[in-house]
Each structure stands twice: as C-alpha cells, then as structure tokens.
C-alpha cells in the first residue's frame, strides 16, 4: 500500500526517477495504474529481488545508485508474526541490516529512510500518553520485536558509519489499497462483499477495544518525502501519526454508518484476536512537525470513505476474494 502511494506522490511532486524493489511473484494490484508508465520517460522502473536474498539487494543498489532510499519492505502483519516469528525477525531485522550493508558498500551516499513502527512501543501505560520518541519500548508481538530491531539497526548504521539514515515510527495509517489483513480494511472489504450479496450479513472482528490514532496513507507518504528532503539529519528518529483517535470499535461503527445495509451483524472471531495487543496507540508528533512543518490534512471521514469505496470497486470488478 504505502509504496504505491509514495510512488504516486513522487511522480506528481518531484522530478525523480522512481525504482520499485519487489519480489518476482509480487501481487502488483496496487501498482497496476503505474505499469503502463514503466520505463516511460525513464521515470518508473521495477527492480526484482528479495529482502532475504542479500546478493539481490547488492545488485539493486549497484544498478540504481539511488540518491534516496525509502525502506518500507517488511513482513508487516502483526497477526502473522505469531505463527511465523522466525521469518518475521529474519526479514525485518536481518533484511534491514543487509540492505544497509549493500548501501554502505555500494559506493554512493544516499539519504535513507528506515520505516520502523509505532508497534515498538507496544503495551504503553496510560501515564506515558501521548507517546513521544523517548517512551520505553514494550513490544507486544514478534512483529513489534522485529521493528525494535529495525529501529535500532537503522540508528546504528547512522552512528557507526556516518550514513544518513533516519528512522520513523509511523502510527496507524490507512486508506485505499490497504491490505485486507488489517482491521479497518478487512471490515471495509466485508461490508463491500455484504453489499454485493457475496457473503451473508455477518461481519467478523477481533479486538474492538484498542485505541488508535488514525492517519491517511497519502498524508504519510507526504511526510516521508519531507523527511528525506527537509534538512535530513543522520540518526534522527521521529514519531509520525494523525490527530484523530478512537477505538477500533468506533472506527467500525463509522464504516457501518457508510454502508447501504443496515442489517449487518458484528461477531467476534477468536481467530482474529492476538495473544497480546498494543492497545493505546496515541502519538506525540511534536518533534517531526517542528522539524518539517508537516501536518495531516486528510480527515478520518474521508479516509474511511475512500477505503470503503476502494473495496466496493474491487468487489464490483468481479474478482473472487478470500474473506479475511
């Protein structure tokens, strides 16, 4: 999701070439609209490889010789990390180290953005709210632990090798193209499927009590662009997030209010519950806002409407979907 929106933003707001790094069997649905532009005016390029295949990272860096690197790649699903913890740790920690090694030995001096996650803070006591950059880490999943490693590896390469690496802890961000394993997106997908009569009017959920601060992915990528262009500071680390907070349950109520159906039953599915949950995700983003002047501008209501409309369009396209 994020990479596709970042490509959209850079193509519209810079004169940069955009090189997307992806696996050979990657689902390209989120970048279908960009594919006709591949190699068009030498602005959009696809480079194939894998974060766990270190030579492919070295080849990509050598081929592209990037001026800026946005490291967004990860095993990014917290729920999956409970069933595949080794893969998650290897991809997110060792993969980040391998990428930074490839950059360090690649001959250039790019500005590098390493994307950690607000999940590094995990189970935050209420006394620490809102969460600033110096709140202690208390990760609540193998994914969160892997992102602690990602965060520390990024800062280490800046301090040890003088590389211009900056780390972000982006809080919940969503919008069109969001993967259907995330709560708000699977809710929107289920609503769209129910509206089209593809599944019964039963919407399955996990934990609805967690507090989240919501931002739009299109605001997020604008922040990332500012991060690397507005006085980039080696070793800096920032919390980034929106300004609207509510529980996952309240978010679901809002999505249901947008539906054409008024008979949808909400059912808790034990399979969707995490063993531990990061339940108070409310950021203090003062540091990043003061440094860059960034502010979120897309309201929560538009984000949710656009997310639901995205799934309506996909469902109406006639594709078959797993209900996740």
Image (tube, grey):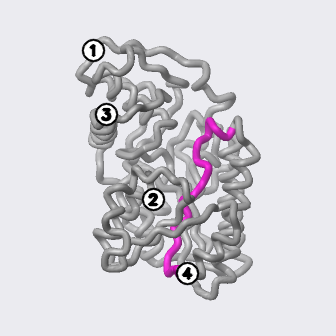
Residue bearing the label numbered 4? 63
Q: Are marks 2 and 1 in contact (CB under 8 Å)?
A: no
Q: Are marks 4 and 2 in contact (CB under 8 Å)?
A: no
Q: Residue at x 49, y 23 (%)?
A: 205
Work out whether mark 3 precedes mark 4 in sequence or the reverse, and give the earlier one: 4
Q: CA distance from mark 2 to mark 1?
A: 35 Å
Helix, strand or loop status at disc 1: loop
Work out whether mark 1 precedes mark 3 in sequence or the reverse, and give the earlier one: 1
Q: Left or right of 168: which side holds 263?
A: left
Residue 304, by quadrant, is: top left
Residue bearing the label numbered 3? 318
- Which is closer to the viewer, label 4 or label 1? 4
Residue 315 placed where, x, y %?
32, 33
Mark sitting on residue 3: 2
Q: Are marks 4 and 1 in contact (CB under 8 Å)?
A: no
Residue 297 placed where, x, y %?
30, 53
Mark sitting on residue 47: none
Q: CA distance from mark 3 to mark 2?
A: 25 Å
Q: Left or right of 226: which side holds 12?
A: left
Q: Left or right of 193: which side holds 114?
A: right
- Which is closer to the viewer, label 1 or label 3? 3
Q: Which residues are magenta?
A: 64-81
Q: CA distance from mark 4 to mark 2?
A: 20 Å
Residue bearing the label numbered 1? 262
């Amino acid at each position: 999701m994020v990479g596709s929106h970042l490509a959209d933003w850079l193509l519209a707001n810079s004169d940069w070439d955009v090189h997307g790094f992806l696996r050979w069997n990657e689902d390209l649905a989120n970048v279908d609209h960009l594919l006709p532009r591949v190699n068009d005016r030498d602005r959009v390029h696809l480079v194939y490889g894998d974060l766990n295949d270190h030579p492919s990272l070295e080849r990509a860096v050598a081929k592209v010789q990037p001026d800026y690197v946005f490291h967004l790649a990860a095993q990014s699903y917290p729920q999956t990390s409970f069933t595949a913890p080794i893969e998650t740790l290897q991809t997110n920690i060792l993969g980040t180290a391998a990428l930074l090694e490839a950059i360090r030995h690649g001959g250039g001096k790019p500005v590098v953005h390493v994307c950690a996650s607000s999940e590094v803070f995990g189970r935050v006591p209420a006394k620490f709210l809102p969460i600033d950059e110096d709140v202690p880490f208390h990760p609540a999943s193998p994914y969160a632990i892997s992102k602690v490693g990602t965060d520390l590896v990024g800062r280490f390469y800046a301090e040890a090798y003088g590389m211009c690496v900056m780390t972000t802890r982006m809080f919940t961000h969503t919008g069109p193209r969001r993967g259907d394993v995330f709560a708000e997106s699977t809710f929107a997908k289920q609503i769209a499927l129910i509206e089209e009569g593809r599944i019964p009017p039963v919407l399955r959920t996990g934990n609805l009590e967690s507090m989240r601060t919501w931002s739009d992915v299109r605001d997020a990528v604008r922040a990332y662009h500012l991060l690397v262009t507005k006085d980039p500071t080696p070793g800096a680390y920032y919390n980034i997030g929106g300004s609207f907070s509510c529980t996952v349950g309240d978010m679901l109520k809002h999505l249901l209010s947008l539906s054409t159906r008024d008979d949808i039953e909400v059912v808790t599915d034990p399979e969707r519950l995490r063993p531990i949950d990061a339940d108070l995700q409310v950021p203090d983003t003062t540091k990043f806002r003061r440094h860059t002047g960034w502010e979120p501008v897309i309201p929560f209501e538009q984000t949710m409407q656009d997310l639901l409309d995205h799934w309506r369009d996909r469902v109406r396209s006639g594709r078959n979907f797993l209900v996740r």
